[in-house]
Amino acid sequence: MIQPIIGIDIAKETFDVCLILDEKNWNAHFENNLTGFEKLLHWAKGKGAANGHVCMEATGQYGDGLAEFIFKQGWQVSVVNPARIKAYAGSKLRRNKTDKADAQLIAEYCLREKPALWSPPPASFKELQALVRRLDDLQANFLQENNRLKSGGKCQVVQEDIIGHIAFLERNIEQIKKAIQDHINSHPDLKQRKELLTSIPGIGDLTAAKVLGEIRDVCDFEDARQLAAYAGLTPRNFISGTSVHKKSRLSKMGNSNLRKALYMPAIVAMKCNPIIREFYQRLIMSGLRKMEAIGAAMHKLLRLIFGILKSGSPFDPKYLEKRAYAY
């Protein structure tokens, strides 16, 4: 007997499901709340599926509650990158785009591809991720308000309101920064990883916190390339036959928060990190454009992060000398 499969198309208020059981399909629609979660399980049991494999797309926070609820009920859960589902739909030449059709597509993907299983992150990680993402939001708002103030053309009342909002945001940003560091210091595992990351030239306390807030556990990734793919930092090549050779670009099909967190540290590392500096200069001398080389430096920095966290050993500033001597 084939394991029951449920594909879920999640939205903010509701979710659609498709149950595949004994070569039959059933569809249903529920509210995205605890009552809806319980109704889903009752409906599935009524169809003969007491447990099985549930698959949904990674859609921010909309599906977190449902994924954790189902996991606690003993079901297997997979949370898949939407790009994988989109690619699978393209391979099947799917043209219809409805919630019902999407749920069926996700269920079929789960049945055929057997995606990796998911488990809920620890509470310490969830809180850190929430804090660093809130900091990003506040900093984005701070930048927007500063740009509005500098643009001029505002009446005095509006200018005073913007100035007051900027001061409010500054206070909030400092409070969140302190909360992040307090949270890390109160969890020995996070504190140890932060100290490992800050041993890398170019990575400060906040960058380390952001990286840790987006990478749940480096052991979740088989190798550095898999982590780079998760961040959308793997190159995307355009080569066909003998005539089409377009420039490679970053795939950008991954965690944009992690990718954004690495941009400025890579810029700094190109000046003060001997490994990144040597790598960047070699790329520029080979003819790569500046932005391409920066993207490659971000990729290299992430690989360095992976190696440091995986080994548990801090950055070795004499690594290049040892490598040269070894050869």
Image (cartoon, rainbow, N blue to C red):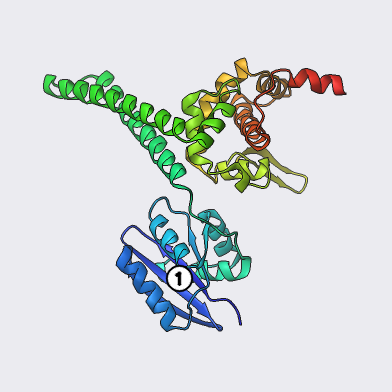
**Number of numbered discs on residues:** 1
Image quarter in which the C terminus is found = top right
Which residue, as the protein is rendered here, is positioned at the far left? 157
- Please tell me which residue lies in front, 36 or 112: 36
Q: Which residue is mark 1?
A: 101
- Please tell me which residue lies in front, 49 or 74: 74
242 relative to 291, above or below: below
Q: Is residue 259 visible?
A: no
85 relative to 192, above or below: below
Q: Quadrant of residue 192?
A: top right
- Please tell me which residue lies in front, 222 or 100: 222
221 relative to 85, above or below: above
Residue 230 point in image, percent of width and height: 58, 45
Residue 187 point in image, percent of width and height: 47, 36
Q: Is residue 191 visible?
A: yes
Which residue is rendered at x = 21% and y = 20% of the image? Answer: 163
Which residue, as the protein is rendered here, is positioned at the far right? 327
Q: Left or right: 69 with respect to 310?
A: left
Which residue is rendered at x = 42% and y = 28% of the image? Answer: 181
Residue 113 point in image, percent of width and height: 62, 65
Image quarter in which the N terminus is found = bottom right
Q: Left or right: 235 with respect to 153?
A: right
For numbered disc 1, what is the local secondary structure?
helix
Which residue, as the protein is rendered here, is positioned at the far top? 272
Mark 1: amino acid: Ala
- Please tell me which residue lies in front, 177 or 10: 177
